Amino acid sequence: MKRVTWPKHSVLVIAIIATWLTTYIGYITSFNMKIDNMMQEFILFMNPLSFLLFIYGLALFMKSTKRRNIYIFSVSLITSIIMFSNAVFYRFFSDFITLPVLFQTSNFGDLSSSIGANIRPWDILFFTDVIIIALAIKFIPAAESSVSQRSIGRKLYFVVAATVLMVNLGLSEAQRPQLLTRSFDRELLVKNIGTYNYHIYDLFIQSKTHAQRALADGSELTEVANYINANYAEPDPKMFGVAEGRNVIFVSLESLQNFVINNEMNGHEITPFLNELTNDPDTFYFDNFYHQTGLGKTSDSEFIMENSLYGRNGGAVFFTNSGNTFNSMSERLGENGYFTSVMHANNKSFWNRDIMYQALGIEKFYDVESYEIGEGQAVNWGMKDIPFFEQSVELMKTMPQPFSTRMITLTNHHPFDLDEEDMIIPPYDSNSKTLNKYFQTVRYMDEAVKIFFEDLKNSGLYDNSIIVMYGDHYGISENHNKAMGMYLDKEITPFDNVELQKVPMFIHIPGYGKGKTIDELSGQLDIRPTVLHLLGISTKEDMQMGADIFSPDHEPFVIFRDGRLVTEDYIYAHEACYDIETGEATDSQACEPYIDRATTELGYSDLIINGDLLRFTDKEEE
């Protein structure tokens, strides 16, 4: 039988094609990336190629066939792991992995349940190229060539690779001008330059970020301060100090989105107690309020409400900048005689809280060691909300007054598992197990909040406190749009995805009697100035991006960490400008001024954090 003669470097060619096609198929099957036209589809198809040509091409410099094959196989395995990891991460966060996230290893144990819930049997397909390459190595015989042939071939090969990269970048820039300098949207980057090139770009950005702190000298503060001062909103005299001297109890309502408020699921009221609060004369209910978190999720919401600054693009400030100087709300409250604390029945090192809370000036952290978790009182991430609230009120009785404490709930957390005895309502009946269970855990959390209010009243703390409750971030990601569309009886568009980022916010002031629903467009950055002004504490000199929602000068404008934005008239999302009234796409020029403003504001916030600029304000005060 005649032996088949394979061309030189057949294994290399097979490896490039196999990984290229595996990556592209992974794009279209595991990532919900919006493609608007054929050119974007072509860019998505070609964008893995330049990286694969370069990285696999390094095998051409290896003389030994065995070493070459080991290298090619290793590259295929690493690229498959990268794609698989991003797919699992994307299903939970609707985003792509960044370097700071990879270094959050202390969170991995606690995240295991959420990670496990997002692995699919078909994820094995991400390793199809590894199998193909292994078979090629085994069955294709080696061939040799002369040194001169190798030298000429290598040069030509890398010229082709560079040309592919230039074409890719050129087409991407034509589709999205200033792609690498203006975009905060990682999905947009992956769509245009590919997953692998995106990770290289991320490495460059993170290196640049670390250099910013080393090179900062404080001169940048003047420009940032001028911007903040120009946008300061004077407090409403009627509201300033209405809660002066009272205890402040913040409740972070885990994963609670606003669409469940005053709503039903198959005839079952989802949040009966919170619904009552929306009509309570002592309650201000903000129904047009957005979370503004990024990859830091709950830790981002904590950072935002404490500092009225945006979280970092691509990571959690709690990890990347815990050594910074901050001017937090807790610090301001401490300066005004408040005892400050956080109550969270979870591991103190999760999200690096034990370190970050010290930087934020929080005096006491009541972590899992402060609670007694009895049989049947734990679920998923820690203690169930009802016993958590009950024991927390007992701890509050021991706090010096006035105090400020932030309570972080746990039960309504992905993957939304609940013991049968805690299921007050049945599950939903969509194609999404996540959404089906979500309504049950939300209903449980609502019951827990009701019990919490009763316990506060019985403890004697209620009348001299204000309770500020807010959803920390979304619970149902865009990966469940089909199920959400079934529940809301509509097709979910990028416009709707932004609308679904609304979270409820309640400010309950016992005995006030003038509460109401407030539909002023606002977001989590506004919590800090709003609450401090209610307590009679000025924020005129503070470096904050948000504004007092009660102020007549409050600007109805919300910016998201990924560059999306909401105004009174428009929503900008996925490179499209939508009319807020119709939900339909409109002239993109209408959103341009707001996009420029969002880019500026996010840039200033990043400058403060990455350059640790607030350390220079401390020096000036000294």
Image (cartoon, rainbow, N blue to C red):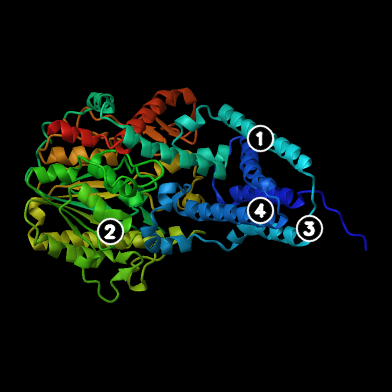
- Verify CB contact (< 8 Å) between mark 1 and mark 2: no
Which of 502 and 89 lies nearest the eye of the viewer? 89
Question: Looking at the image, is mark 4 or mark 1 nearer the viewer?
Answer: 4
Any mark on residue 140, and which? 3
Q: Secondary structure at mark 4?
A: helix
Can you see residue 250?
Answer: yes
Tell me the amino acid under the disc marked 2: Thr
Frontmost residue, 180 versus 599? 180
Closer to the chain start, of discs 4 and 1, is: 4
Residue 434 x, y percent position in the rendering: 45, 59
Residue to which mark 4 is pinned: 72
Quadrant assignment, res 556: top left
Q: Position of residue 31 (x, y in %)?
A: 55, 49
Residue 164 circle label: 1
Is residue 129 visible to us here?
A: no
Residue at image mark 2: 409
